[in-house]
Image (tube, rainbow, N blue to C red):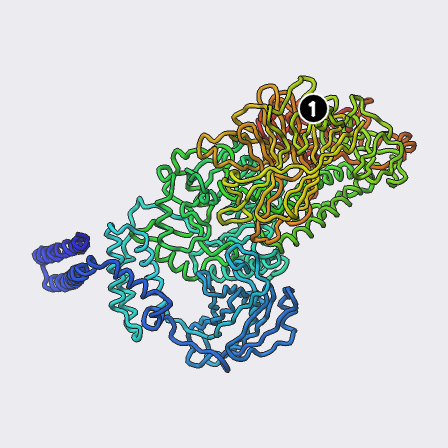
Amino acid sequence: MLARTLQRNVRTVATPLRAAIGQTRQYADDKFKERETAAENQYIHKKQEEQIKALQEQLAKAEKRANDLQAEMSYLQKHPDVTKSRLNTFMSDSQFKDVNIHAALYEARVSGAPHVQLEVWAAEGTERPTFEHAVKQEFKPIKGSDHTFGPSWSTHWVRAALEIPREYAGKEVRLLFNPGCEAMVWSADGMPQQGITGGNGADKRVEYVVTRKAKAGSSVTLYLEVACNGMFGLGDYTIGPPDEHRTFRLQPVELVVRRSDAIALYYDLSVLKQMLDKLPRESPRWWQALSTANAIMNAFDAQDAATLPKCLEIARGFFAARPGDATHQVYAIGNCHIDTAWLWPYDETKRKIARSWATQLGLVERYPEYMFAASQAQQFEWLKELYPGLFARVKEAVKGGRFIPIGGTWVEMDCNVPSGESLVRQFLLGQRFFQEHFGVRCRVFWLPDTFGYSSQLPQIVRLAGAEYFFTQKLSWNNINKFPHTTFNWVGLDGSSVVCHMCPAETYTAEAKADQLIQSVAKHKDIAYTNESLYLYGFGDGGGGPTDDMIERMRRMQNVDGLPRSRHAHPDEFYAHVEKKADGLVSWHGELYFELHRGTYTSQAQTKKNNRQAEFLLRDVEMLSVVAQESAPGFKYPRDELTRLWKLVCLNQFHDVIPGSSIEMVYRDSDRMYADVLESARGMKQAAVEALFAASGLCAAEQASGLLVLNTTTWPRTEVVSVPGGGMKGCEQVRKHDQAALMVAAAVPGGGGVQLVEPAAVAHSVPASAYRESGSGLVVLENLHVTAKFNAHGQLVSFVERRSERELVPPGQAGNVLRLHEDIPLFWDAWDIEINHLEKYRVLEAASVEIVDEGPLLASLAITVPIGSNSHMRQFVSLSAVSPRLDFACDVSWHENRKCLKTAFTWDIRSDVATYETQYGVVQRPTHRNTTWDLAKFEVCAHKFGDLSEFGFGVALLNDGKYGYATLGNTMTLTLLRSPKSPDAHCDMGDHSFRFAVYPHRGAFNESRVVQEAYQFNVPLVQLPVDMQRASKAVAPAAVAEVEGLRKPFFGVAGAPNVVLDAVKAAEDGAQDVVVRLYEAYGGRARAKITTSLRFAGAVKTNVLEEPVDKVEFAAESGGCGGSVVVDFKPFEIVTLRFSK
């Protein structure tokens, strides 16, 4: 039947040809009658005969093709699988390569002296020397064909002296260099030319064009920088820990001349083969592809190059068929997604960038239609610093519109763990870099590969000058398939961006027909928009598109059986979707990723370092702004703060902060965090010393009191501790570390200060600890709460005393430590799977001891054996001034694929729990009604998770943990994991961390949970002072006297749901100050933002600090300070810029 269909298709062409011949003859006869002269008749007759002859030739070809098809199909229809297998064999580089297409690909090849002579120099250890250094070293000849490079991570420079054979004259000559690992080709004058990907994988790229048109006997010298790592590192499986002793064998190095007709035919057949793999067999086009391939194989002779033109002619007949006007349109863009660190360290990424982008610049120059996109401003900056010549080429290609900086962020960051301010800084650093160096403002937020997407991203993206969002990672969901491809993504505040997830479901496509077909088949919103993006090119480890891929794209761009495709700037795709799409659906809230939930916990120290750095930099910026305005001679440390923010943002890359990189990466990040924390602490100290120079500051051992500074915008009363016990006369010394304890009462917010004397006591019922007679329970108690612990270290009673509300149900407990089996399906460091909830054991304390008995702090110590080599020591404490119950944990952790959780069961009923996200909160189900609910068995939260009902709730706070879960009335916090790949020693060793439970009257949005979580993470700034001198000092620099009232440097009045999150100097070097606030609880507010600093005006800006709206600045009399009133929508982020 299909054979007859194909014959009819050809006969359909023949029939009008016969009709045309008849019409031409009739036309000629008619014209003869009209003409009066013989000359005219003779001319017309000649022309018409020429047309008839041409038509008859076409008719003969059509009829011959029909007859051929009839003969072929009588066999093909009987054995199509045999013919398809024949094509596979014909294309295979294995058993029959001496007689199939591979036998014809090269017309000449030569190796060895005098044409190829190699020398090598090996760098020391893991050094990565520059070209300038390497070429000055002593190179030694590579003799024979058995040379290896190694060990792992080492660098070897090869000098290749090439002499072009005379018979190569006038031809394109390529160097075939396969070191088994990665390499870079350098010209003799030190310009990087192209990356090499060795080995025998699909991503192999081992040919370099030495010359397009060779001169006989000419000589060329090249250098090849060999890096002893594969494209995906050095693991013995994809994500395995690196093998530190790998070596790589150099395959024979040759100069080759490719046979262009054979190469072109190879590309034709590749596309035909892919179409046969994916098109439905019932379609005529499948049979046409099979027939065409069969005809080509029949015409081909490996020993006779003269057969190639005939083969190409057959292929051209197939590719000449065009799709219809309504065919799906694919917008293609080359890319080489380079993980900024993953299975290799940062320093190797710097070379991957150069290798990959040098290659792509070469392709841009050779293929006029080709376009390439690259993201991550950090990678561009590395290129600028380390490869300035290559960066200059990139700038030129950007001007030409075919090398496209995209994304707008510093790195392709994780979107779960970083704070809201960190996400803003990603865009601030990224967009400014692209604007400064390329004159480009990125309109597309480009994040193909990260592990979940915060519900505040649409608002942040919009505020950062972008309009669109691209990703594809949700196609990896392992429980529910995400239902959309192109849609409006609506964030917490109602902001929206057009989001597209390529239906090919990969950002590293290989320009294959089956993937283009999938772009139609898996497009979930094709009813509204008949177009899609297609990202192709080897990636993760870099590389990008190859010649083969671009050649295939050329053949597939406008051929029947496939969607139409063409290279295009992603902006063009999104603009077209926005203009043409009719009725796009909307998705509200977070894009929760149903996989890689273990990344909320893996590499605990990295996450803790990030949290500390974020809040420390917050304080440094705020205090430095105030010091610059108030302390003569102080200069805001702009350059150093930028440097530190770049390091913090770098480590927020989506394989670093999630915990999914190799151990080498975390050695690097640990050094970076140490740098950030040390420098930031120094700058913070410099700022407070400048502010309080006249306030009696002194060394800790000489101090008789404290000056306490509050960088939050609300007043705080807390018990503060002074390490070392040097403060004499204090009310209490904490026993386990001998820290002096004092009460800092009602410290004003917004930079307000308070002097604290050691003898100050709590103006409330003191905290106490005792063992309850009869029950043996250990009790911690103050005015607010009573907490009781059993002999296992579990919280069995927690009473809010004012309401007499018991929060622990009968027979249940809190602080239940559970050790779970944690064996994922594959992605070790990434995944914590639902089955881990089925297999665990409850850990019981070996001892529970009272340590501190008050009056300022009551505490107990709980010792918990975990395993044969792991244990925990918990200090549970209750201060005299707060209902918050704190748990400070020291853990020695040496487990294998186990995870440690703490669980709290509360006498509270709610179908949802509330979790903090960037600049707001999200609510998630506490049940598993649907598979969508079930999939959220582990979720990400920032500083707290909260379970509330009408009138009451309890929050679980943390200082650097992110993995939460709530099922029914039990909330858990994941504390530690122990995966073994890609870091074989992930989280092994000692850990210190804190969590706390905070009961509150009223539901969550009536509480102070957000403020309490800030306080748990942002300690009061403590400065030792001589109280006599401090008391006599004029009002401290951090307190301005205006009409007899003390005013904070920055304050928020009239809106308890608005949080001031950042105060910083403007990025553009002006003397302006930027203040960022957000609505935290999901309601509206009218907030009065006050300042005691001298400003003349203010404007509302986007997060790039560009004016977007006017606000009225009300100056105080005397010119000292002023205020603005701002209306907030739920979860709105507001940035104000104050000017002088």
Side of 1054 where 661 appears, left or right? left
Can residue 691 be seen in this snapshot? Answer: no
Residue 167 at x, y = what percent? 41, 80
Residue 127 at x, y = what percent? 65, 64
Residue 526 at x, y = what percent? 36, 40
Q: Quadrant of the C terminus?
A: top right
The outermost residue toward the front is 774
The answer to whether residue 659 is above or below residue 727 is: below
Mark 1, other Cα within 10 Å: few <14 / some 14–19 / many ≥20: some
Side of 398 where 324 appears, left or right? left
Secondary structure under the numbered disc 1 in the rendered image: strand
Can residue 807 be seen in this snapshot? Answer: yes
The outermost residue toward the top is 803
Residue denoted by label 1 = 1053
> Which residue is drawn at the image coordinates 35% and 65% (left, top)?
92
Q: Nearer the viewer, residue 201 or 138?
A: 201
> Which residue is drawn at the image coordinates 55% and 43% (left, top)?
821
Q: Quadrant of residue 1125?
A: top right
Q: How many marks?
A: 1
Side of 753 where 1 appears, left or right? left
Q: Nearer the viewer, residue 696 or 1088?
A: 696
Q: Nearer the viewer, residue 260 or 549?
A: 549
Q: Quadrant of residue 348?
A: bottom right
The answer to whether residue 799 is above or below residue 433 is: above
Amino acid on which disc 1 is placed: Ala
Side of 787 where 1102 appears, left or right? left
The answer to whether residue 60 is above or below residue 922 is: below
Residue 596 at x, y = what percent? 52, 44
